[in-house]
Image: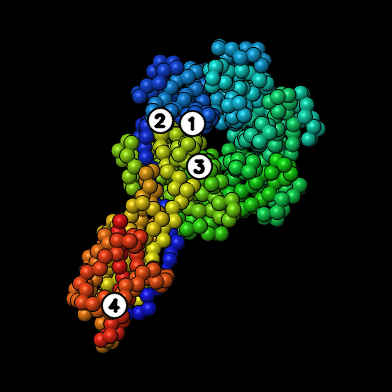
Amino acid sequence: MKYILSLFLISSVLIFKSQNPTWVKGGNAINQAGIYGTLGTAAAANTPGSREGGATWKDSTGCFWVFGGNGQDFLNNNGLLNDLWKYNPATNQWTWIKGDQIINQLGTYGSLAAPNATNKPGARQTPCTWTDANGNFWMFGGWGYGANASLGYLNDLWKFNPGTGLWTWMGGSTIPYQGATYGTQGVPSALNIPGARTGHSAFSDAQGMLWLFGGLGNTTNSMTVGYLNDLWKYNPTTGEWTWVSGNNSINQNGIYGSIGISNSNNKPGSRLNCTSWKDNSGNFWVFGGLGYDASNTLTQPLNDLWKYNPSTNQWTWMKGSTNCCQAGQYGTMGIASPLGTPGARTRGISWVDPADNLWIMGGEGFAAGTFTTGALNDWWRYNITTNDWLWIRGGNFIGAAGFYGTQGLSAPGNVIGARRMGHGWIDQSNNLWLLGGNGKGNSSATGYLNDLWKYPDCLVNPITLTITSLDSVVCAGETTTLVVNGASSYSWSNGSTSYYNIIIPTVTTQYTASTTTSIGCVFSSVFTQSTLPCTGIENLNDSHMLSVYPQPSSGTIQFSKPVSGIFQLMDINGNCIKEIKQIENKIKLELNDVTPGLYLYRIYSETRKPITGKLILCP
């Protein structure tokens, strides 16, 4: 029984688990010593030592930069670092640019606002960073060393010019634990300065202003340390700081208001080491961290998501809980859900892709349960438009070890181990890159890492595949054809690698067509071909009495027996595009003037019912 010919479409479905990371460089074990080579000279053997909490930037040529952190020097001693490195993704080589090969070095400040070849920041971890409109790198504070041997929270401001290779001390103190000068909220002043701190977040706006938020450190009192929620703006042209919002005292609870509604009274609670982003519209986002929720009096991991709009000076609570210590709501990997939310955590790694998705990987906190915290290796993507989190990859449990595979090769079994305080960049092809952190390499041991990974962001430019079927329902054992379009190469679940797939289902069957991009992203569509037994039902078309071949054809078709009557060729919408009248005893027809594609044909004969079928014409 042949049913009415019809066309069906199905949207593509991205197979997230087929995005495979690549171990690019560095060791697959913990606590690796740095290999510095020659200062200023790139080399294949060069590798920064294992570390967490360094400062990062990306320059205008697409190279990645990392400074300092807590980790291993060239003697494999562990401590605070002040070495500056550059990685070129095109050559896969590191260059030691500046700083020292040994841990716990003091800063050399020189004169305020005067660049000098001898200037260098002291060793430190978890400062905040910016890149200005001229491509200069900026850094503020952190936990480490100033000009003397006193270890503590810093509030020194530095600028590095990648063109000249010079550091400049731009403001703040050369010694730790300096209190803030807030001045009047909203009013810039040359006297204003944020207090010393670590674990704070930063972003730059379209006007070239540099912003920082929160952290752990000092407010006005240099003797009192606590969690902060103050927001500051720095004008590089005038050298003035402005206290914009938040409190000038420590350990503040959050004021959430209504979810999704901005309000001048809203403010995140005090926190440190939250994950932060700047979206493509210039808004600043923070997620979680270790700090204060709406009511608690102790610092705990958070999973609240906030957006700050610099133009309105208002915070908006966007997602997550007003209470601490939330477990992750994972759902099904690869399927977005309004209920999906990463668990409460601190020290996650972040990226923003060109499609304005916010990405987070790992950190330290809660996975699917709230029994204990630990290092995580889950990947999440937040869609600003839909306000949905999507669990992309990684485990929904703590403490996963890595599986490295072969260096330089992407493979389905590759796993980036659980970690916190790693370093992230996105390259000019939208691949996400991750360096080191503190966590697990290829074993159960935990320590400092220097592994460099590349992960393809397949969601920036997704490919939509569509599958067409000529028959909504076929009889068991009857032939029909599926056609896919949307890419240049395909792989079907039944082994076909053409854009068309001639199938003979005996039962209702799912067929999947996939395409793989040059960076390993896999996009797929699934079509279900309905099939009925059709037992005892006559084939009304008598198509078994006549066949058309070859399929596909390059322009000349042949019939299995002589044909007389009228031949019509129709597109898949049923529009007649060619008609040949009064054919008599033909066994061959020339269709070279017809554009290649998928067609229907109908043959009218005086002696039998119309015969219909499908025809594929190739170039």
- Cα separation between marks 2 and 4: 66 Å
Q: Amino acid at mark 1?
A: Gly
- Cα separation between marks 4 and 3: 76 Å
Q: Write down the quadrant of residue 216 in the picture.
A: top right
Q: Earlier in the sequence, mark 3 or mark 2?
A: 2
Where does label 2 land, which residue?
Answer: 90
Question: Which type of secondary structure does the marked residue at label 2 adopt?
Answer: loop
Labelled pair 4, 3 in contact (Cβ < 8 Å)? no
Labelled pair 3, 2 in contact (Cβ < 8 Å)? no
Residue at (67, 41) in percent of width and height: 270
Question: Which type of secondary structure does the marked residue at label 1 adopt?
Answer: loop
Q: Amino acid at mark 4?
A: Gln
Where does label 1 land, which residue?
Answer: 62
- Cα separation between marks 1 and 3: 26 Å
Say if residue 401 shows up in the picture: no
- Cα separation between marks 4 and 1: 68 Å
Q: Amino acid at mark 3?
A: Gly
Labelled pair 4, 1 in contact (Cβ < 8 Å)? no
Q: Is residue 592 above or below residue 419?
A: below
Q: Earlier in the sequence, mark 1 or mark 3?
A: 1
* Mark 4 surroundings: few (<14), some (14-19) or many (≥20) residues within 10 A: few
In the displayed structure image, the side of residue 539 where residue 112 appears, left or right: right
Q: Write down the quadrant of residue 482 in the picture.
A: bottom left
Where does label 4 land, which residue?
Answer: 582
Labelled pair 1, 2 in contact (Cβ < 8 Å)? yes
User: Which one is in front in this view, the residue at disc 1 or the one at disc 3?
Assistant: 1
* Relative image position of residue 434 (x, y in whole percent): 45, 37
* Relative image position of residue 198 (x, y in whole percent): 61, 31
Colour mode of the rendering: rainbow
